[in-house]
Image: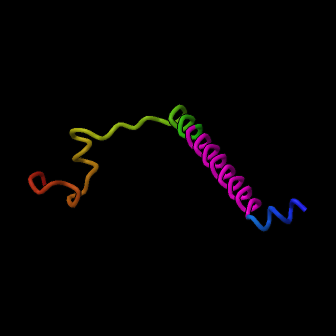
Amino acid sequence: MTGLVENLTGATAKKAEKANAMLRQQSDVAQARQLSTLAAETARTSLRRKNPRGRRLLADAGPSQLPATVA
């Protein structure tokens, strides 16, 4: 009988909505943790590459990539 009353009043829909919201929040937190773990691991294991400077900057760039004053 209580199930019938809950269905009529919409209490089960409210409970399901709260449960769905909780599941969404939990999945968002899990995804954020996975991304932060992946980013930390990548930063720890990847090689660091510095931006080219000086002669290498000019040698590696094509004429279209250089400013008009240099080319």
Q: In this view, does 48 lie above or below 14?
A: above
Q: Residue at x 35, y 37 (%)?
A: 50
Quadrant location of the N terminus? bottom right
Near-viewer residue (69 or 56): 69
Q: x%, y% of residue 54?
A: 21, 38
Q: What secondary structure prevails in the magenta region?
A: helix
Instruction: State the image quarter where residue 56 is shown.
Output: top left
Q: Residue at x 69, y 58 (%)?
A: 17
Instruction: Indicate left or right for 16 with 4 as reference.
Output: left
Near-viewer residue (10 or 57): 10
Instruction: Indicate left or right for 1 with 67 as reference.
Output: right
Near-viewer residue (43 or 67): 43
Residue 12 lies in magenta, yes or no?
yes
Furthest residue toward bottom:
8
How many numbered marks are there? 0
Quadrant location of the C terminus? bottom left
Furthest residue toward left:
69
Q: In this view, does 27 lie above or below 64?
A: above
Instruction: Indicate left or right for 3 with 21 as reference.
Output: right
Q: x%, y% of residue 35?
A: 57, 43
Instruction: Indicate left or right for 11 with 3 as reference.
Output: left
Q: Residue at x 80, y 61 (%)?
A: 6
Q: Which residue is drawn at 66% across and 46% down?
A: 26
Q: Is residue 71 above or below residue 4?
A: above
Residue 35 lies in magenta, yes or no?
yes
Q: x%, y% of residue 10?
A: 73, 64
Stretch of the chain drawn in magenta: 10-36
Near-viewer residue (46 or 55): 46
Furthest residue toward right:
1
Q: In this view, does 10 lie above or below 48?
A: below
